[in-house]
Image (tube, rainbow, N blue to C red):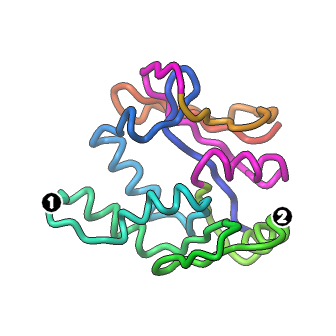
Amino acid sequence: MAKLVFGMNQSLDGYVDHMAFAPSPQLFRHFIEEARAQTGSLYGRRIYEIMRYWDEEHPEWNADEQAFAAAWRRQPKWVVSHSQAPVGPNAQLLEGDLAGAISKLKAEHDGEIEVAGPDLARSLTELGLIDEYRIYLHPVVLGQGKPYFAGPRPRLRLLAHDRIDEDVIRLRYVPA
């Protein structure tokens, strides 16, 4: 059975914003390895549209960006959306009963399925479907933005913590 993992970069004050701070080269390489190991990714419509950037080739990319794009393209992607808009290569639209669709997805796969985006994570948290939360804590204060926990905060138990690069700590939590 697959495990749903919600992990994102977060500021010290609890916000996620890919435009406000970016991963260091060492952290980006960590994310490449994570993407290579994942069974697939589960996206809300908005973050999926942002991530579609990796579907296109960009001649200015360095080796790490090319490696991430290759890992991202290889894995299946499931997009939760109420719209009928088409999805790109290696992606499938999930509609209807969210709890049933995600439970089926978890039952049909092994390994880790990344959950991308705080809004989708909120819905899945409310349904009790997220198995692990990974916070990549950066030493920045944003003061505003989208919070990592977009809804009520679940009761969590610290599973592990480790330093990923000079400034970033990864905190791993499971539901308590």
Rendered residue at 68%/57% (across/down): 4
Q: Which of the 4 quarters of the picture holds residue 78?
A: bottom right
Identify whether 142 is placed above or below 58: above
Q: Amino acid at mark 1?
A: Glu
Is residue 106 left or right of 68 when viewed as pictured? right
Is residue 101 left or right of 87 when viewed as pictured? right
Pinpoint residue 121: horizontal percent, then vertical percent.
69, 49
| Quarter occupied by the C terminus | top right
Q: Which of the 4 quarters of the picture holds residue 60?
A: bottom left
Rendered residue at 73%/51% (across/down): 131
Region rendered in magenta: 116-144
Pinpoint residue 48: horizontal percent, then vertical percent.
52, 62
Mark 1 — residue? 60
Mark 2 — residue? 99
Pinpoint residue 23: horizontal percent, then vertical percent.
35, 39
Q: Estimate the spatial distance between the alpha carbons at disc 2 and disc 1, rounded to whole Å.
A: 41 Å
Kind of element beneath mark 1: loop
Q: Amino acid at mark 2?
A: Ala
| Quarter occupied by the N terminus | bottom right
Q: Nearer the viewer, residue 46 or 165?
A: 46
